[in-house]
Amino acid sequence: MPHTISFKQPSASSHLLAALLICISAGCGETTSTEQQAQDNASATEAAGDETKAASEETDANKEPAVTTEDTTGKVLRHAVFFAFKEDSSPEDVQKVVDAFVELPSKIEQITGFQHGINNSPEGLNDGFTHCFVLTFADEAGRAAYLPHPAHKAFGDLLRPHMKDVFVVDYWGTPQPNAPAKALQHAVFFRFLDGADAEKVAEVEQAFAALPSKIDTIKGFEWGKNNSPETHDDGFTHCFMVTFDSEEGRAAYLPHPEHLAFVEILKSVLDAPRVLDFWTE
């Protein structure tokens, strides 16, 4: 991906202070050339900041793929994307975005799987994100072809006027051969405390992975660490995808003693969770 170039300029405040001192000493009552230069510099600094931000957003999709060191045998690469839409975007606007995303697998051959739905989690931990999409690639090369693909860029142009926020986490997942055809996906993301003990984090990973053997309403499970080359993960490093075949199954899981015991293990190292549930379409 092209690197965003940042230009460091003298702060606008230092120029304005100098202009103010000159003005006071001269007793001036109108704008001096030095003060005008300071204002021009301040405007330039603000413009440069806006341009840098825009360039960063524009080049996210062109980043080089992350290089993984984990064993990916028998796994696929999941690309989990969540959107929050602007309040002034109409339901029709949002549906056009959804429809355009749904069309991408027919235009980009590297997409080998696609699920989407609207958040229906009862936990209130979605941080305002409402629309859920999980794309599957066979490998990192597939993702690398997808991100700068013209069809994906055209979708981005349609999305941009309506998108309030985006959250993206990629991870290596294990295909679930016995997963229900219509599944309730319970997507759980963790951001751990800075300096969290690595052994404690590993204990959380192992404890979560053990839940399917303890709670029979879990019909599918996979998890992985974020490896997205984009910059939209909000610091979340772990994704756990828990599959149910009904809302009753989820309702039994949330207060289950084994789940509550897992939460106690998690508390000592967790900074924040994020949870989105959706019925696959």
Image (tube, grey):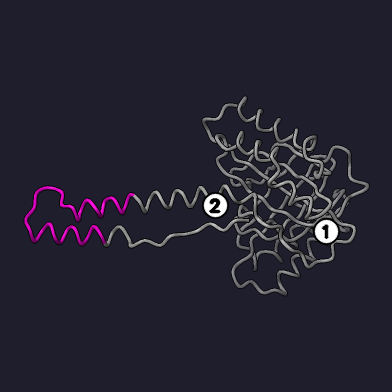
The crowd level at tag 1 (other Cα within 10 Å; few <14, some 14-19, many 20+) is some
Give the residue number, with chain letter if any, for mark 2. 56
- The residue range painted magenta reads 15-43
Numbered disc 2: secondary structure: helix
Q: Are marks 1 and 2 in contact (CB under 8 Å)?
A: no
Residue at 41% in and 52% down: 48
- Give the residue type at disc 1: Leu
Sequence-first tag of 1 and 2: 2
Q: Position of residue 83 (x, y in %)?
A: 63, 41
How would you classify the magenta stretch by its main secondary structure? Answer: helix
Q: Residues within 10 Å of mark 2 (few under 14, many from 20)?
A: some
Which residue is drawn at the image coordinates 54% and 52% (left, top)? 56
| Residue at mark 1 | 211
Q: Amino acid at mark 2?
A: Ser
On the rendered image, what quadrant is the C terminus found in? top right
**Magenta-span inclusion, residue 23:** yes
Residue 248 in view here? no
Label 1 residue SS = helix
- In the displayed structure image, the side of residue 157 where residue 215 appears, left or right: right
Q: Position of residue 68 (x, y in %)?
A: 76, 64
Q: Quadrant of residue 25?
A: bottom left
